[in-house]
Image (cartoon, rainbow, N blue to C red):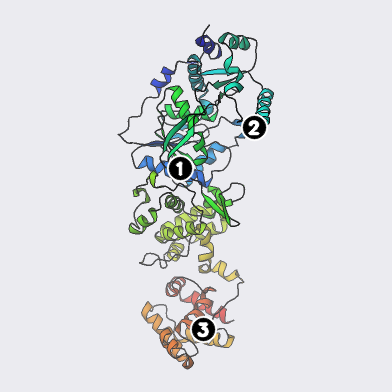
Amino acid sequence: MDYKDLANLIYKDAKNIEYYEEKYPERNLEEGAIVTRFAPSPTGFVHLGSLYQVVIAKKVAEQTNGVFFLRIEDTDQEREVENGVTNIINSLHDFGLNPDEGMTSETNESGKYGPYKQSLRKEIYQAYAKYLIEQGKAYPCFCSEEEIDKIRKKQEAAKIRPGYYGIWAKCRNYTVEEMIQKIKNGEKYIIRLKSPGNESRKIKHHDLIKGNVDFPENDQDIVLIKADGLPTYHFAHAVDDHLMRTTHVIRGDEWLSSIPLHLQLFQVLGFKPPKYAHIAPIMKEDNGGKRKLSKRKDKEAAVGYYTEIGVPKQAVVEYLLNIANSNFENWRKQNPDTDYKAFDLQLNKMSVSGALFDLVKILDISKTIISKYKAKQVYEESLEWAKRYDKELEEMLEKNKEYSIRVFNIERESNKPRKDISKWSDVKREIEYMYDDIFNKNNEEYIYQKINEKEEINKVLNEYISNYYNENDDKEIWFNKIKDLSEKLGYSREVKEYKQNPEKYKGHVGDVSMCLRVAITKRQNTPDLYEIMKILGSKRVAERIVKAIK
């Protein structure tokens, strides 16, 4: 009896690996094209760090006319959550990061290199496990969990490195005949790698981000196929990345220490390994120190958080590009209106240490992006967000479409557009004073600034509405009339003039304008008051001023 007999006993129905090598040929792509993947487990929400990996992986694939695909690694089925795949797909879609191929729903997929869900690739893993057993490079292990635990305790007591290796890997020393007899006796088993490594030897590896690193060789006889017949992550990733013709594996640097094992798996399987790029985690300040952005502690770690508060997808992506390559910020300044996809991302320019998370920076980027939107786009995107998260805003916008677009257009298409909206959840607060239903039921106080005595406020408002307001005035005439009003009531026509001779005046034209602004909007900070009054119209302006006087 030999290893082929053993392999046939374990996997008698498994196909030859040549079948899969032919079924999944090299991709017909131009030279230098990068094939990357996002390979999450469907175990919960998508982390911002995962989205960071996706942004980088998709970007380097796109800029080389390559392929970015989505593979679901669901071999640990105990941790899987309901609709986990759907959550992943929707999260990528929300940020405009749709894969070129891979899973498109819980059960559907697109592409020629599937199945793209590992639980559906069981027969493929068995074929390659059979191949390794035939080569004497893998074997069945009959140790129970109790036996493995005893080995671990002995190692701990002796203060030696834990694991199933060398003299501790007792099942690797059984003869083929002994293994076959145990299987025929009905003993339960898993499949382990017969590692050719020696911990005293080093491997040298060039990581595309970390640079040159070296590690001891892997000598652990790791599990390849579990008792349920499904592969471990390590084995599945090697088989899948080979057959899906992945050229670059871009992943978090917590996997860097697995490099010796993963390169060894490619070696024993006879595969050309992909290039690896290990990304430093996104960090957060915490009590004077730094820690990884945490799923458990930080709401902003979930990418759904940005969708819920209404940060445009472009802002999140550009923030992640900014921490990926520090030169992105300068590129954006030099190319303010260019699609971010034109930026050339370089893996070797990525930081080897973790970037510090900055929500303020994300919102600043978002403000700039929204400020460049035309009013119709602001209307459409805020309405789309409102339909999911804010019914009152949805009703407000749908009821007054053309009016709302006019409101959004105040100070928009200009050299210095307004930057008051950083996320769609800001919209209602920023524009609600333009809607009478909300304005009239709003019990906010009128909080004036320098002009704050009731008698003086009423004098300004009465005088303005009686003698100076005409909705047909252009902006220059309108403002000159406010200057005339200021002068009549003892205020300086110019701020500069007031600052030179403050004792001569009650205040200046800006104080009078503020009085009008608060009366009309109940706000001290708004976009251009002239444009607000033009949209409201004379009847509504007069009603609001009368209400303020009362």
Say which label, 2 or 1, has the lower sequence index: 1
User: Relative to residue 522, is residue 176 depicted above or below?
Assistant: above
Residue at 55%, 11% in the rendered image: 9
Numbered circles on residues, count: 3
Could you give the CA–CA distance between mark 2 and mark 1, rounded to whole angstroms?
41 Å
Residue 12 location in percent, x, y? 52, 12
Q: What residue type is labelled 1?
A: Val
Using the image, tell me which numbered label, if any, was put on residue 54.
1
Q: Which amino acid does label 3 sit on?
A: Leu
Could you give the CA–CA distance between mark 3 and mark 2, rounded to whole angstroms?
85 Å
SS state under label 3: helix
Q: What residue type is labelled 2?
A: Lys
User: Which residue in the structure is indicated by mark 3?
Assistant: 461
SS state under label 2: loop
Image quadrant of residue 76? top right
Q: Is residue 497 visible?
A: yes
Q: Is residue 227 visible?
A: no
Residue 274 location in percent, x, y? 41, 32
SS state under label 1: helix
The quadrant in which the C terminus is found is bottom right
> Observer-nearest residue: 56 or 424?
56
Mark 1 residue crowding within 10 angstroms, few (<14) / some (14–19) / many (20+): many
Say which label, 3 or 2, has the lower sequence index: 2
User: Relative to residue 87, is residue 173 depicted above or below?
Assistant: above
In the rendered structure, the answer to whether residue 399 lies left or right of residue 157 reads: left
Extreme-bottom residue of the structure: 504
> Observer-nearest residue: 520 or 67?
67
Mark 2 residue crowding within 10 angstroms, few (<14) / some (14–19) / many (20+): few
Residue 311 location in percent, x, y? 49, 54
User: Which residue in the structure is indicated by mark 2?
Assistant: 159
